[in-house]
Image (spheres, rainbow, N blue to C red):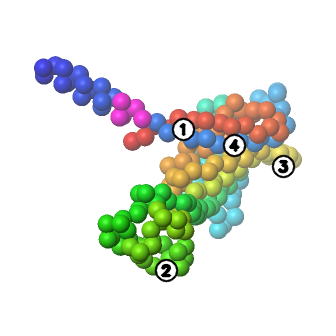
Amino acid sequence: MKRYVFTVTAALTLLLGGCATTIRSDVTTFHQWPADLQDKSYVFEAPPAQDDTLELRSYQNLVRGELARLGFHDAGATGTATLKVSMRFTTTDVPVQVIRAVDPFFYSSARFGFYRPYRRGYWGGGWYSPFYDPFWGGMPMYEEYSYHNYRREVQVAIKSAADNRRLFDVTVHNLSREMSTPAMMPALVQSAFEGFPGPNGVARRIELKQQNG
């Protein structure tokens, strides 16, 4: 019996520990990437002073990781490089308000003599009267609730350091209920470099699995 309980517990632990969230992003890439580029050294362009935050620098490190995976190397702040990399991101809170009809069977307690509050403005008052039962031809009852979506955009550009010519532009769009941008950014940056340099002038849907906890 003890062995059986242990097996079930271990299986449940594995199941819960293996939960993953799918992060879907729309990725659009434009590039004129030279096929014969040998020197893949780069430096980050200095952002405007108001944008040079610790948060941005943290996300630049994510870009560094993806570039290293692709064979690029950071020449450092004082090094000589053939490429320049820039990054910007935005997060926009998008409140969503929902009004929906409510099943009167669920809310109706008039016949039992109960008062139930409902949202002001839909029946013209603030209380549900036992003399006004939606079961018997009354006006429909509605409820209102709201939630927040978060729209994120990440842009990464790679340019030639010699003539400032753009070689690679990618824009990642994501809409989710996740409030934390740091929690989402690793997947968004990874999506930006998926299949680098990717198809030119084509919007793609990239789906990545992110482990929970």
Element at label 3: loop
**Vertical order, 5 against 150 (above or below):** above
Look at mark 1 in the image and give the residue it sits on: 22
Which labelled disc corresponds to residue 125? 2
Residue drawn at (53%, 53%), measured in percent from left and top?
177
Mark 3 or 1, nearer chain start: 1
Look at mark 3 in the image and give the residue it sits on: 164
Residue drawn at (32%, 70%), measured in percent from left and top?
114
Mark 4 or 3, nearer chain start: 4
Give the CA distance from mark 4 to mark 2. 45 Å
**Vertical order, 132 against 153 (above or below):** below
Query: What amino acid is at disc 3?
Result: Asn
Which labelled disc corresponds to residue 26? 4
Element at label 4: strand
Query: Which stretch did the figure color magenta?
Result: 15-19
Query: What amino acid is at disc 4?
Result: Asp
Percent position (x, y) of residue 4? 18, 20
Query: What amino acid is at disc 2?
Result: Gly
Mark 4 or 2, nearer chain start: 4
- Front in this rendered view, residue 163 or 90: 90
Percent position (x, y) of residue 67? 64, 37
Give the CA distance from mark 2 to mark 1. 44 Å
